Image: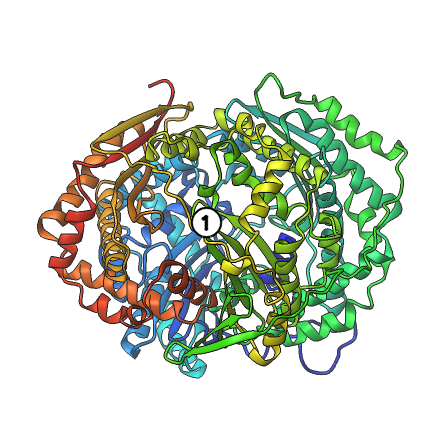
Amino acid sequence: MKRILFLALFLAAGILSAWSQGALDLNSKIPFDKKIITGKLDNGMTYYIVKNDNPKNRAELSIAVKAGSIDEDEDQLGLAHFCEHMAFNGTKNFPKHELVNYLESIGMKFGAEVNAFTSFDQTVYGITVPLDSMPILDKGLLVIYDWACNVSYEGEEIDKERGVIHEEWRMGRGAQDRMMQKYLPVIFHNSKFAKRLPIGTMDIVDKCPHDALKRFYRDWYRPDLMAVIAVGDFDEKMMEQKIKDVFSKIPKATNPRKKENADIPDHDDILISIVTDKEAPMTTAQLFYKHPEFKQVTVKDYRTSLAQNLFSMMISKRLQELTLLATPPFMQAACMYTKFLGPKDIYISFALTQNTGLEKGLETIVEENERVKRFGFTQTELDREKKSFLKEVEKQYNERNKRKSQSILSELRGHFMDQDPLPGLEVDWELCQKYIPDIKLEDVNALAKQWITDKNLVAVIMAPEKDDVKVPTEAKVKEIITTVKNKDLKPYEDKVITKPLVSKEPTPGNVAKKTENKKLGYSEWTLNNGIKVILKNTDFKQDEIQFSAFSKGGWSNNKDQDAVAAEIAADVISESGLGEFDNMELDKYLSDKTVNVTPFINETDEGMNGSCTPKDFETLLQLTYLYFTAPRKDETAFTSYINKSKGMLENNSTNPEMVWRDSITTTMSVNHPRKKPMTIKRLEEAKLGRVDYVYKQRFGDPSNFTFVFVGNIDQKIAEPLIAKYIGGLPEVKREESFKDLNVGMPKGIVDKKVLKGKEDKSFVYMSFPGNFEWNQKNKIEIEVLSLILNIKLIETIREDKSGVYTISSYPQLTHYPNGKYNFLIFFPCSPDNIDRLSEGVMAEIEKLRKDGPTEIDLNKAKEQKLRDRETNLRENNYWLNTLKGFYFHGDSPDGFSDFEQTVKSLTVAKIKEAATKYLDPKNRVRVMLKPENL
């Protein structure tokens, strides 16, 4: 039921694309989507424009630069990334911090709708702007124009930003980074990439002369290396003219510096990197098979790419099956062929193992690669994966007019940076229908011999330094890899599933009562067994229905001795299969369907969440029916779950951040026994019999559940299916709700230090807890207060004090068993700066309590709230949660309609009152992670 990750990545990256004209032969070039307007200005700048109305009234504007850390000189390590930061610290038309101030004033949030990133070979900037008026669009284009050619690089701002970048570097420090610094040079093998990590070196970041930074900008920020990309709800011809008018002003580069093409040298020997660290959070084995870059130019290349992805999905499915064994060789594993760096691709095999299972995990992925290389896949595997693949592409095709603008923008950037094909989803669907059935087993099997070779192979082993971890030597790793050719392996045997999902059809019920809320556009049905069903038909997505079922109760009803069983019951059952199908059989049965259902048990409620396409709506209902009536008590699945969970937990005690997070949990619950973090010792208390009992107890009475469906629902088609599978559920009519476990809250000022880890790095968690009256007015006030505080904390703690890279505040709100709020503030920083920055946070809070926000900041936050609402109203998930709010929390539909007026009516005085209520300095918790040597 879990979708293979790389298929989604493959589709999202736009590699699957095609055309809707007549078919081309295999030697024809992959055509370019005619809906895309593209061109090149006289100065050499490329542009891409696509009209798209999801989200409505928004434009995504981006500048992409073909320059990154690989282009740095020896005295510039880290300055490509530094240039990215400086774009937000003053330009010709937006001095100092006016750029961020302006974008916040039109409702855009820094980090969400205003952001950038730097990698080895590219730097990308992007903003989202509303399209209420032409001046807003014009100013948005002016922002990205300034990024392209008018960044100020004022000395004072450069020096202030050094601290912010240093904190970003500090935030990334830890066991993973320490190990990465050791294994990346082996993977990159004598390549310049090994010495050009985007974060750079702090010695240069802290001390570089201003001109070194400006030199990088002068050398590489030039029109022939840039593209301006615009996707949104606008007239594309108008946008093309605006881009020509604005960006043609940038002068053509004179005597441009030549760009070097970095490569990763080949090697005949197997390279091995074994890295360990006392704080390593996991044990992994990875194999990197490096190959020359595969370019998609012709239709034949396109067909090959389809075979490549079928291969990756099929071998990953085999590895996934092995994780279902009672004693699995690894907790997770996958294989994938993908683009790497420079003119190189990689075929990756990855395994996450238990501490004691490193050699076994490595042996298994090596053996499974060899098994495919020696015997290939089976025809039934290929047939099943073809159906699954086509189903996914069909879904993308059906949603072609509902795609998010950011997704399209990402594809356009891929074309500019890497020449990824852009034929369009219509052609994509036609090509897939034509060529996926045409792909033969030998086409896919041939890839194994091409990909799985000793040449250019790098093995990377990562593990914690612990007594129970047996780390293989380089000689042992090489032996495992090289001797597999002589092992006695048997071909894979595919288990084919032919039986029906529901073996015994339910006796259908009926819809006893129907009511309509015409104002908000949803229906309420009451079935014969008492179950309420809420339906809202939308046109936001063509091929999506989202679903949630819920009932008050939860694990608060279970006794302390069943605490662990209650916490894991839903997860165990979801990994056990359903009815007559074990987990592997169920995955195979569902492989050509786009559907998922997952049960949950929380403290105060239980239920299920899921989604499907309209075609698979009956399957979604069948799965739901079986989760109520035929959950499996499977000893193998239970043992497998326990073993994998132990593997995930076994290094938590040496992971500084996990120790800190667990300390937060116990502190905020005042050490309540039912709020303990999960540990191996606690997990060992679980027994399958109690897990089965708890699950059946929680889901034993479907009649007190409410079901919500939102999406492309035809109610005439849905009604008999709902009557059959939901109306056919048993009626028990027990009276049940949640229980109050009397979980307390910290009172007064609480400061707790967690001394763990050796890096000069701290994390600070600040909390203001209290009682909360659950209603829309209060929720809006505390959320707007949080938006205002975020604006001020970024402005003061990050920009003015240069003390953090990131800082955020947000409220956690709980309705049941009694209303509570927990106003959180989180930031990483230097251990030396904890008190100084904490005082800075409290100073901003005190200003809000004493004076309230400025009108400017209040209006920014209100605008952000309203802009979010504007886009959320076109999201199925937003409506799903809204309807759940009506029926689970008792939220008022009238209050929902008054949302905008409630936001607009907020005043400085009201936010000041909210700050006084929710940010009490006399009731404050702080949990700090510090290095253990302090």
User: Judging from the image, what secondary structure is the residue with disc 1 in?
Assistant: loop
Image quarter for residue 921? top left
Residue depicted at 32% across the width and 69% down the height: 896
Q: How is the image coloured?
A: rainbow
**How many numbered discs, if any?**
1
Using the image as rendered, state which of residue 161 and residue 498 is in the foreground. 498
Image quarter for residue 128? bottom left
Vertical side of 638 occupied by 606: above or below: below
Describe residue 903's horizontal placement relative to residue 933 as left or right: left
Badge 1 crowding class, 10 Å Cα cut-off, few under 14, some 14 to 19, many 20 or more, is many
Using the image as rendered, state which of residue 192 and residue 601 is in the foreground. 601
Using the image as rendered, state which of residue 167 and residue 440 is in the foreground. 440
Describe residue 435's horizontal placement relative to residue 861 as left or right: right
Vertical side of 761 occupied by 840: above or below: below
Describe residue 580's horizontal placement relative to residue 848 as left or right: right
Quadrant into which the C terminus falls: top left
Residue depicted at 78% across the width and 43% down the height: 452
Which percent across, then down, holds residue 9?
Answer: 60, 57
Which percent across, then down, holds residue 72?
Answer: 46, 44
Q: Is residue 423 visible?
A: no
Residue depicted at 27% across the width and 52% down the height: 89
Residue on which disc 1 sits: 553
Which percent across, then down, holds residue 931?
Answer: 37, 23
Quadrant into which the N terminus falls: bottom right
Using the image as rendered, state which of residue 90 and residue 718 is in the foreground. 718
Q: Is residue 302 visible?
A: yes
